Image: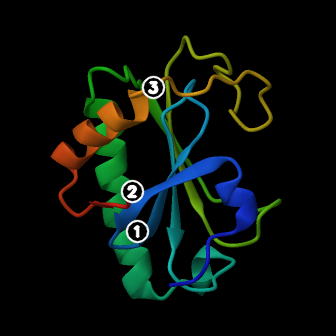
């Protein structure tokens, strides 16, 4: 497994592994925001072998399904992006959005508002997540 960029880990928690790579949770509780970091040293989507691309598509669909279907999160829209302007290691953002979130309708990147997760909040989300995504192996 390739190492996850320190820059990514400075703003996200490595919560587990999916078939396509490491699963991180952004540390801003204002948005349910996941990142997938595939195993290997990749910079662009086109650098990923087709097998990993296909696994990522399945994992993206699973995460989006969870975000939209989870009644506690109240997600109305999912944003999927692979920007990589600051961290060149390929990683994919999957962000749940709703019309009352602080950045709506603008992008979440660079928005100044932030809220730390409260005690037990991440664990409760992970319980619901693992109940919906059987291919997820939690790290903890």
User: What residue lies at 77% left-to-right and 64% top-to-bottom?
Assistant: 87
Residue 56: mark: 1
- Which one is in front, 122 or 86? 122
Give the crowd class for mark 2: few <14, some 14-19, many >=20 residues within 10 Å: many
**Would you say residue 45 is visible in this rendering?**
yes
Mark 1 or mark 3, which is nearer to you?
3
To which residue does mark 2 refer? 60
Give the crowd class for mark 1: few <14, some 14-19, many >=20 residues within 10 Å: many
Say what secondary structure mark 3 lies in. Answer: loop
Say what secondary structure mark 2 lies in. Answer: helix
In primary-sequence order, the first of circles 1 and 3 is 1
User: What residue lies at 41% left-to-right and 27% top-to-bottom?
Assistant: 121
The picture places residue 90, in percent across and down from the top left corner, at 64, 71
To which residue does mark 3 refer? 119
Give the crowd class for mark 3: few <14, some 14-19, many >=20 residues within 10 Å: few
76 with respect to 6 (left or right): left
- Residues under numbered marks 1 and 2 in contact, where contact means CB atoms less than 8 Å apart: yes
Question: Alpha carbon of mark 2 to alpha carbon of mark 3: how far?
Answer: 27 Å
Q: Residue 27's quadrant in the figure?
A: top right
Q: Give the colouring mode of the picture.
A: rainbow
């Amino acid at each position: 497994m390739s190492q996850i960029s320190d820059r990514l880990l400075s703003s996200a928690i490595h919560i587990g592994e999916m078939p396509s790579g490491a699963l991180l949770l952004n540390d801003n509780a204002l948005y349910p925001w996941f990142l997938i970091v595939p195993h290997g040293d990749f910079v662009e989507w086109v650098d990923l072998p087709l097998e990993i691309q296909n696994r990522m598509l399945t994992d993206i669909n699973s995460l989006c399904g969870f975000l939209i279907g989870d009644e506690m999160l109240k997600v109305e829209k999912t944003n999927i992006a692979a920007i990589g302007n600051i961290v060149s290691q390929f990683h994919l953002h999957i962000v749940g959005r709703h019309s009352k979130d602080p950045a709506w309708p603008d992008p979440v990147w660079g928005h100044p508002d932030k809220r730390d997760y409260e005690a037990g909040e991440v664990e409760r989300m992970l319980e619901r997540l693992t109940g919906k995504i059987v291919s997820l192996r939690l790290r903890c």
